[in-house]
């Protein structure tokens, strides 16, 4: 058997995942035509590849029509129209190659016995592309005549499939994008990377990279070159589109320093006071990519004395992650074991010491006007405090309520942390004058030096 590699055009898009390759050899029957024997064989091999790997078909057609009407006064009127249709899709059956057709008409009519109709046409084209590797073929029948050749082949085609290492995982994919005036600043990059880290560690999302396009493009160019193996080239076309886009706009982030100097006339000294303050603000939007629907949008501000920019970014991080997690997939109770409540929040989303209110879900609530599902009736049944946090789950101890009253699937809502208590203001202590600084006048008064 002969080995033949046929590459028409790269158009295949294999299923997504972190994948392991599995090659399978498929034997099919194929028929081909051509002016020569070689062309007939190539036609049959292309047919075999399309049977195994499918094909992409692009169709473009146009049908013009023009009409000229001549009136008795000698004036003429012409109207014309043009329509174009373009469709594209994938087929899992053999394609027929490229084909052209012609259709269209023009009509001229005058006020009299004569009528002339002119037929005109513009072609339409079907383009079929596919790619695959032929391991070998055997000629079953061949026949060449003056009109050309035709062959029947038995072809072995290699079909490469990529199996996901975690086929049961059904996670929403999300990409984090920084925008706005400060999008290229170090603080915006730090916030974007921290959001990415937390989303990855949470185990709730498939996080897509949108920050290293240049490096990825170089790697893709290598795969497309002849230096990569056929199996490696088969991985092309697997890039995921994000289900959600988290768009973060850090509008302000900085620490200001103020210096206040005061000259004291009595002593001739200068009193110098230095103070710092931190101000930061962020706006973030969660967009559903397919529909461009805004699922959540909010902003947050931070203002404090001192250099607390790190605390500001950490506060933004916790709020953003908490909001989008609640919108896309709120935390729920997985199980109750030995009096401990397990929720589906792990590292990156849950932390030891956090307090969650547990709500049992009741009847579904439907908006009578729109028919939209508004959620479900909720009943507060318990409160838990997180103790142990693992990669994908967290264990909580019941601090109020009963563990027996918590059904599986109950929603866990994070309590807002209590505001920090302000330290009591200290009353100024007046220093008592020393005896050496006191002088008693004759009239009984005391002069302090």
Image (tube, helix red, strand yellow):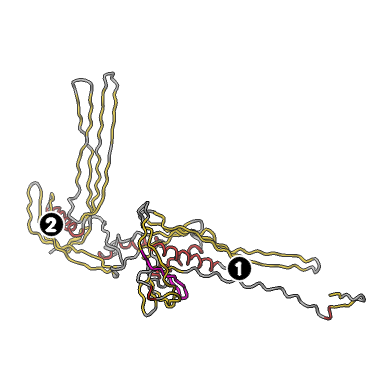
Residue 298 placed where, x, y %?
48, 58
Q: x%, y% of residue 333?
A: 37, 71
Which residues, given as a range, are shown in magenta? 349-362
Tell me the residue at 30%/65% (across/down): 17
Residue 54: name its quadrant: bottom left
User: Disc 2 marks which residue?
Assistant: 30
Question: Sequence order check: which comes first, mark 2 or mark 1?
Answer: 2
- Image point (13%, 60%), residue name: 28
Judge the density around disc 1: few (<14), some (14-19), many (≥20) Cα neighbours within 10 Å: some
Q: Image height check: is 360 above or below 70?
A: below
Foreground of the two, 343 or 174: 343
- What separation in Å lies between label 2 and label 1 (alpha carbons)? 77 Å
- As drawn, the label of residue 306 is 1
Regarding residue 215, the answer to whether it shows in the image is no
Q: Is residue 244 left or right of residue 149?
A: right
Q: Is residue 297 left or right of residue 144?
A: right
């Amino acid at each position: 058997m002969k080995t033949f590699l046929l590459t028409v055009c790269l158009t295949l898009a294999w299923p997504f995942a972190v994948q392991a390759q599995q090659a399978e050899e498929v034997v099919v029957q194929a028929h081909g035509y051509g002016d020569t024997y070689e062309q007939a064989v190539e036609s049959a091999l292309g047919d075999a590849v399309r049977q195994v790997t499918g094909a992409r078909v692009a169709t473009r057609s146009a049908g013009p029509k023009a009409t000229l009407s001549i009136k008795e006064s000698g004036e003429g009127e012409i109207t014309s129209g043009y329509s174009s249709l373009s469709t594209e899709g994938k087929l899992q059956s053999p394609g027929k190659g490229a084909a052209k057709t012609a259709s269209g008409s023009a009509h001229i009519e005058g006020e009299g016995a004569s009528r002339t109709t002119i037929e005109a046409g513009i072609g339409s084209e079907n383009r079929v592309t596919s790619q695959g590797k032929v391991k070998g073929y055997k000629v079953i029948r061949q026949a060449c005549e003056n009109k050309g050749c035709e062959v029947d082949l038995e072809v072995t085609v290699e079909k490469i499939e990529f199996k996901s290492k975690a086929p049961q995982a059904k996670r929403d994919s999300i990409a984090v994008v920084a925008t706005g005036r400060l999008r290229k600043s170090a603080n915006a990059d730090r916030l974007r990377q921290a959001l990415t880290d937390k989303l990855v560690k949470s185990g709730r999302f498939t996080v897509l990279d949108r920050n290293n396009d240049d490096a990825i493009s170089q790697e893709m160019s290598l795969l497309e070159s002849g230096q990569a193996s056929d199996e490696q080239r088969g991985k092309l076309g697997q890039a995921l589109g994000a289900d959600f886009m988290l768009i973060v706009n850090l509008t302000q982030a900085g620490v200001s320093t103020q210096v206040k100097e005061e000259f004291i006339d009595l002593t001739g000294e200068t009193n110098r006071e230095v103070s710092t303050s931190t101000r930061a603000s962020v706006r973030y939007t969660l967009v559903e990519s397919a529909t461009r629907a805004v699922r959540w949008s909010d902003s947050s501000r931070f203002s404090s004395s001192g250099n607390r920019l790190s605390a500001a970014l950490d506060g933004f991080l916790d709020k953003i992650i908490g909001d989008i997690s609640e919108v896309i997939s709120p935390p729920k109770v997985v199980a109750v074991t030995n009096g401990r409540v397990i929720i589906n929040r792990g590292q990156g989303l849950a932390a030891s010491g956090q307090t969650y209110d547990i709500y049992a879900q009741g009847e579904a609530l439907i908006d009578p006007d729109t028919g939209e599902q508004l959620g479900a009736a909720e009943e507060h049944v318990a409160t838990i405090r997180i103790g142990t946090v693992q990669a994908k789950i967290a264990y909580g101890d019941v601090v109020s309520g009963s563990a027996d009253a918590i059904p599986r699937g109950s929603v866990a809502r994070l309590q807002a942390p209590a505001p920090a208590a302000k330290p009591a203001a200290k009353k100024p202590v007046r220093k008592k004058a020393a005896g050496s600084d006191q002088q008693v006048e004759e009239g009984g008064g005391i002069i302090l030096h």
